[in-house]
Structures are given as structure tokens and as C-alpha cells.
Image (cartoon, coloured by chain):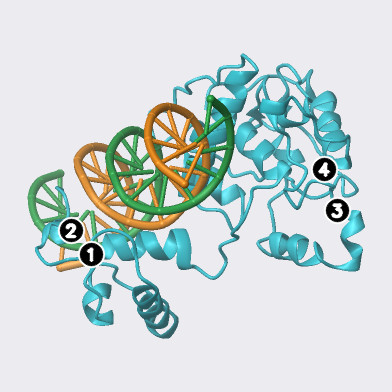
Chain colours: A cyan, B orange, C green
Amino acid sequence: MGRSPCCEKMGLKKGPWTKEEDQILVDYISRHGHGNWRALPKRAGLLRCGKSCRLRWINYLRPDIKRGNFSHEEEDAIIKLHQALGNRWSVIAARLPGRTDNEIKNIWHTRLKKRLNDYGLVPPQPSLKSKSQPLKPFAMDLQTPSSPPHSSTTTSTDVHASSYCSISSHCVVSDAVLLQSDLPEVDESFWSQVFSSENSSDAGDLPATVDGESRFDSTKNETYETNSSVEFWHRLFSKTENLPVLPEL
DNA sequence: AACAGGCTCAACCGCAGCCCG
DNA sequence: GCGGGCTGCGGTTGAGCCTGT
């Protein structure tokens, strides 16, 4: 095994990327795909290591990256998923289309963790040491409550959710269970649909907080106005709180 | 206006696991 | 089955920005 030597080579640039470098990388990948990351910088004419190129592409340049503030729903989803999955940022990111693991990790450490601490709800340190433990995929249903979760039976892979979930919406539910069956896979087009309609005349159908403007501010002790998404999570957890708890993931 | 402390986030580091010869 | 190379992941860092005094 051992560490890849590519970043140790002399003469490779480090630090913030310039617009020119970004452009070169985007141009190259859009034309040829990334292929072998290690070989990419040389082929593209970049004085960067492949690792750096990969990170820049995945975390910043990818066309499907959704920039901007996290919505209330996304923050809730992160909190819940973190409770269920632990620090498996890439898995959490996979449930939040358009968001990167790095971004989610940052949000968690800078805002959400602090927010939970403010409420005296210290997030547990999940005992998920092994990356190889199988996780049956599920997805957070972040759609509006007008499209209710799928009704179906409980499965053995239901994910135990948190007692501190929905802090941002003041919707704390104890020992709730996030059902895989309640959380259908998110269509990758979902976010683009939601956020493209955000500015449309149909935006009234969307949760009031989806634009991130009316976020909860724990430092000011302000709450979100009750909105449909809050009701949705409340319904979800209320509906499921008596269901059996999963064994540890 | 200046400074200090806090916060954010892009980027780096190093390990672990997967893949392939 | 083994070993080396590559990729992906999570933890950490630090520069720049923000906010309060």
C-alpha cells in the first residue's frame, strides 16, 4: 500500500486554485473525462497533483454542485443522517444531491454540532469504526410534505434516528425511527427541480425555508415559523416512534 | 478606525480499502 | 494469494472574512 507519492513531487503547486487552473481542469474533464486522476494534471498541463485536482473537481467544479446556504431541510437531514450513520460524510453526502462530503463535514463541525450543544444535546460519537459494514441504502425524503412518505412495511434495515433531531425546527422527538421505507431514494433530478422552481411562480408550494433566508438562529433564540416541512418531520417521527429499534449499524 | 477573537470553508494530509496484474 | 498502485474518505489546518468591542 503506502502513500501515493504524487503530492510529494517537487514543483507541484499547492494552495488555492486560480481561475485559470479551474478553467483548465474543467475544460479537460469536460472533453476527456477525469479518467486516471494521477495522470490527469500532466495531461491537462496543470502543476497540481492528481489528488488536488480530484478534490477541486469534486468539491467545487463539478457542474452538479449546489452552491449556497444549506436549507433547513438539508440541515435537518444532516443531523438525522449523522445520528444514523456517524461521520460517514460521503454516505451522508450521497443522500443530499448536490452537496459534497467536505461541505457537509464543514457544516457539521461549524454549525450543526454547535447548535446541538447549545441545546445541551451532545451528539453521540457513533461507534462506526468499520467502513465496510454494509449499509442498505436509503434516502432522506426531502420533498415537501405534500408528497407524503411511501407507506410500506418496516424492514430490518430501518435506521434508528436521533432524539435530538429536528433541533432547528424545535421538533424534538425521542427514539424515533427513520424508516428506510419512509425514505425513498431521491431522484438526482430532485434538487434541480426544487431549486429551479424556487424562483418560479410555483414557489409557494415549497417549504418556506427552502431559500435559507428564514433559518433558525439559535443565538437569537428564534424559531422557524411553523411550516409544512416541520410538520412533515413531526408526522414522520410521530408515526414511527413506536417501531422497533435497529441493531447497531 | 483599529484590533482581537471567532467563524467559515477550501484545501491538504495520511490512512484504508479496492482493484488489477 | 500477494503486492503495488490508485482512489476515496475522514480529520485537520490555516487564510480570509466577519463581528464585536
Pointer 3 chain: A
Q: CA distance from mark 2 to mark 3?
A: 45 Å
Specify the quadrant of the image occupied by residue B13.
Answer: top left
Q: CA distance from mark 2 to mark 1?
A: 5 Å
The kind of residue on which mark 3 rests is Leu
Label at residue A49: 1
Q: Secondary structure at mark 3?
A: loop
Pointer 2 chain: A
Residue A10, compared with residue A218, is above or below; it is below
Label at residue A149: 4
Badges 2 and 1, same chain = yes
Residue identifier under label 2:
A7
Identify which residue is drawn at 23% across, 64% down.
A49
Q: CA distance from mark 4 to mark 3?
A: 16 Å
Q: Residue furthest bottom?
A: A31
- Front position among marks 1 and 4: 1
